[in-house]
Image (tube, grey):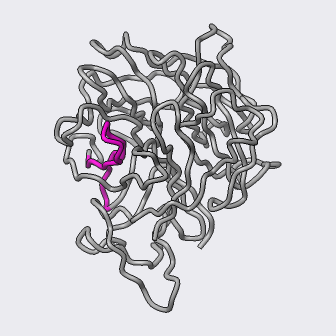
Amino acid sequence: MHDSEATAQHVGRRDVLRGAVLLGAAAATAGMTAAPAAAAAGPVAVAAGPAGMPTYRYLRDALDVPNLNYNLTGEFIFPTIRGVWDKISGARARYYLYYAPHENPGGICVAFSDSLDRQFTEYPTNPVIDRRLPSTTVSHVSSPHVIWDAATKQFFCYFHGENTVTRVARSADGINFSDETPILSTRLIPGTSETSYARVFEHALPGRNNKYVMVFMGVKNGRRIFYGWSPNGWDDWRFSPTPLVNPEPDGVTDISGPTLVKRNDTTYVAYHGSDGKMRITEVGDDFDKEIHLGVFHSPIPSDNGRVAAPSFGTQDGVQYMFYEAGSRLEARICIARAV
């Protein structure tokens, strides 16, 4: 099994037994991530969460926060894990981890590792994007999500600054970003007061002539998950005025930090709620469903009551989840591994 990564987690139906048991056998379907290999001879059954999500166990913090060069606020959020070894030459490591503080002035940061289960090494001249943008200066920039656009052979970094505007910048090497462009603001979603925490994925919707979709948080009578679509991930974005996922069926007041998850031949959104737990909801391949399936990951004592903003990856058939842990403005980036 070759290394692979995916911020949208792909697992086939045969990796789930009636949505309740996850087998430790690797999926053989191309383009899908695999379940963890069994530690002993033969498959080992492990209880799974809703939608057959694996049980993730905390492994370690992703960053040595006290010794970071760029650490103005002591808090970091919204990890994105990206495999780069097969995309660019001269990469600093196999994996790049993007993250940011949220408190002013923020700053988009990157760190490097050759393995998803190890601590990451900070880029020495972080941040790679700061609040002084070509078009304006904002109080902070935060919530980075980075994709590889194969058509242009560039990395696109989506981030917010202020909380009302989501922006995109591009880079050939994943470090030096340019051409920052606003693509989403509250004026495009009537009635919202924030539009931020966006993640973007390749996913075609019927009748939209799109290649990419965006899921993001919009504040409209509470925090909800909205979506948009684009033919190329860079411009010509369109946005639905209607939320994709709402908090009320979960029994919480707010939801945020969405990410797309593909499993069982359908599509889900994973996100966190105002009670500090991560949940998953089926939206279907056409984004025409809203089937709330419940909690798939809850805080442990070291998470200080909150887990949020998951980003998924796979290495050697083992699934990992990078996430933020801790209360708002006190969070840190953690690594969990499927068991």
Relative image position of residue 90 (x, y in whole percent): 82, 48
Residue at x 33%, y 39% (from the top left corner): 205
In the rendering, at what x and y percent does residue 275 appear? 30, 41
Residue that protrudes farthest toward the bottom in the picture: 41
Residue at the image position 66 percent from the left and 36 percent from the top: 154
Residue 197 lies left or right of residue 4; in this view the side is: left
Height in image: 163 above or below 329? above
- Quarter occupied by the C terminus: bottom left
115 relative to 152, above or below: below
* Up/down of 200 relative to 14, above or below: above
Could you say where residue 68 lies in the image, as x and y percent from the top left? 74, 39
Against 166, residue 304 (above or below) is below
Q: What is the magenta segment's predominant secondary structure?
A: strand
Please report the residue visible at 75 percent of the width from the left and 30 percent of the height from the top. Answer: 176
Residue 136 shown left or right of residue 226 in the figure: right
Q: Is residue 294 left or right of residue 96?
A: left
Q: Is residue 15 magenta?
A: no
Front residue (pair 191, 47):
47
Q: Is residue 281 magenta?
A: yes
Q: Quadrant of residue 218?
A: top left
Give the residues drawn in magenta, as a range. 264-282
Foreground residue among 84 and 104: 104
The quadrant the N terminus occupies is bottom right
Q: Position of residue 197 (x, y in %)?
A: 46, 30
> Which residue is depicted at the point 30% across and 74% down?
21
